Amino acid sequence: MTNTCIKELKRQKQRSARKMGLGLLLSTLSLFFTQSQATIIGSFDTGVDVEISSTVSVNQFGTDLFDGLVYVEGSASGNNSGSDFSDFSLGANETGTVSAAANGQLDGIGGFVQSSWETHGFFNFGNNTGSNISVDVTFDITWFANIFTSSSDEEVYATAGFFIKNSSGERVFEDWIELDSLIEGPGTFGVSDSFAVNFIFDLADGDSEEYFLIVDSFGFAENLQQVPEPSSLLLVGLALLFTIRKRKISVLCV
């Protein structure tokens, strides 16, 4: 075999070794990304529960789902829940409940999840007792919001809100909690609280008073990092290994 043939064989072996190394690297990266998808890299959890009671009978108490949404893309999951539709009378010192909750999580590279639940509620006092009455209404509120992110490549946001309007459309109470990983940074953050809102008013005979409620939970989580899909890495790596395995080295020597 001539020196030219020997040199050509060496060059072809070196090129094959480099391609073999690239194929193994891509296949290894694919396994790494596949395993990483089992780890939660971003999540949110938010909820509101409101218990309503009054010292007099409420002629009508009801809740109606205004907007519920779950949108998932890629390596993510999410759901929501809360008060849907109800319509009934609420007796003195009886309790009515309005609630909303939403949660979601990212399980790996490339994902987005958004979920929300917003419930509208109402209750109406009608005085037909023949005399003036004093009404004492209490809203017992319990709520929370939690977020988690593993790095600055993920963004997570969660909020919970509760609003009350009277018959005139005036907002007599509003409050909300919110957490945003762009402000808080990577890590685990949570807020929770329980408190009461109280209204006392007089109601003349023949008059009525109505209150409108909005209970809302909302959150989203998104992976901001752009990387190759694990399946693509695996296919490219295996294709290279397959090509190298099947290739026959042939050198033309004169």
Image (cartoon, grey):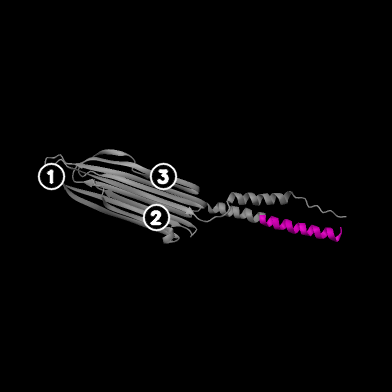
> Mark 1 or 2, which is nearer the eye?
1
Residue pointed to by mark 2: 146
The magenta stretch spans which residues? 1-22
In this view, which residue lies farthest toward the right?
A: 254
The residue under label 1 is 132
On whether residue 173 falls in the magenta region, the answer is no
Q: Could you say which is closer to the camera, residue 199 or residue 243?
A: 199
Residue type, mark 2 in image: Asn
Query: Disc 1 on helix, strand or loop?
Result: loop
Quarter the N terminus occupies: bottom right
Is label 2 in a helix, a strand or a loop?
strand
Residue 90 shows in the view:
no
| Badge 1 or badge 2: first in the primary sequence | 1
Three-letter amino acid code of the residue under disc 3: Leu
Q: Residues within 10 Å of mark 3 (few under 14, many from 20)?
A: some
Residue in view at x 68 percent, y 57 percent:
21
Residue identifier under label 3? 69
Where does the image place residue 10, in percent across and percent down from the top left? 78, 59
Number of numbered tags placed on the structure image? 3
Quadrant of res 157: bottom left
- At 47% from the left edge and 53% from the top edge, which residue is drawn? 222
Q: Residues within 10 Å of mark 1 (few under 14, many from 20)?
A: some
Tell me how far mark 2 sits from mark 3, CA to CA.
19 Å
